Structures are given as structure tokens and as C-alpha cells.
Image (cartoon, rainbow, N blue to C red):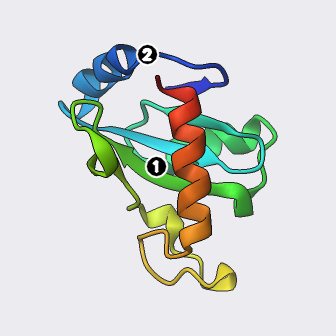
């Protein structure tokens, strides 16, 4: 499990995916600090790593990344850590389109 602060290649991300789930890697994105943690067995583990690194809970969102896919199919906005009624997110999916856009932008900056 690592925190990505600077861009990595999609090939590097694919290696991380192959180590755990084959074609997918779990990631938690910090929308404020513009970093993400990847390579955890559970989103909660990556979330904890970022919290220990100084992130705030309300800025963290869980996604699944499929480095072998293209277009919008490669980011899946689904994680148990996303269930946050206090932030008006009542499902595992990131429901706010603006937050989804920020996540896409950050992931695109960090995985090239």
C-alpha cells in the first residue's frame, strides 16, 4: 500500500492491480490534498493510511481503478467508505457529480 503524490504510469498501477485483485486496484482519493492511496486489500486500510498522513475524513473517497480499461470505465466510484449520510452520500457510490469530477481529475493527474 502506497500514497501516490506524483504521477505514476498506468503500467505501474497495473502491476499493483495484478498483485491483489488481478485487473483492479482499490484506491482512496483525498480531494483536498490531491493524493491517493492504492494497493490495499480494503478501502478502509488505504483510508487509514491517508488519515495517519494528515488527511481529513470528509475529503476521502473510495474508488476502484481498472488500469486495463479505457475511458470512463476505468474508474468505479464504489466503496463502503463512501456511505456517509452526514455528507448526503447514502450509498457506496459517490453520488455528487462535482466530487466525481474532482476524483477523475486527480486520478488523471496521478496516473498517466
Left or right, 80 with respect to 66, comes to: right
Q: What is the x, y in percent for residue 101? A: 56, 58
**Residue 22 locus on image (x, y percent):** 18, 30
Circle 2 Cα neighbour tier, 10 Å, few/some/many (<14 / 14–19 / ≥20): few
Residue 43 badge:
1
Examine the image and state in which quarter residue 7 appears.
top right
Residue 93, quarter of picture? bottom left
Q: Secondary structure at mark 2?
A: loop
Is residue 65 among the parts visible in the rendering? Answer: yes
| Residue lying at the far left of the rendered structure | 22
Residue at numbered disc 2: 9
- Residue 74 in view of the camera: no
Number of callouts in the render?
2
- From this view, report whether residue 25 is shown above or below residue 55: above
Q: Position of residue 57 (x, y in %)?
A: 72, 58
First in sequence: mark 2 vs mark 1:
2
Amino acid at each position: 500500500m502506497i500514497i501516490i503524490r506524483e504521477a505514476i504510469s498506468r503500467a505501474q498501477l497495473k502491476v499493483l492491480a495484478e498483485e491483489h485483485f488481478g485487473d483492479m486496484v482499490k484506491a482512496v482519493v483525498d480531494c483536498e490534498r490531491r493524493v491517493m492511496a492504492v494497493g490495499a486489500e480494503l478501502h478502509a486500510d488505504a483510508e487509514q493510511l491517508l488519515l495517519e498522513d494528515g488527511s481529513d475524513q470528509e475529503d476521502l473517497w473510495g474508488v476502484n481503478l481498472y488500469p486495463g480499461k479505457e475511458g470512463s470505465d476505468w474508474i468505479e466510484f464504489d466503496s463502503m467508505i463512501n456511505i456517509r449520510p452526514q455528507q448526503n452520500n447514502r450509498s457506496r457510490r459517490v453520488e455528487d457529480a462535482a466530487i466525481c469530477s474532482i476524483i477523475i481529475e486527480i486520478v488523471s493527474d496521478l496516473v498517466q
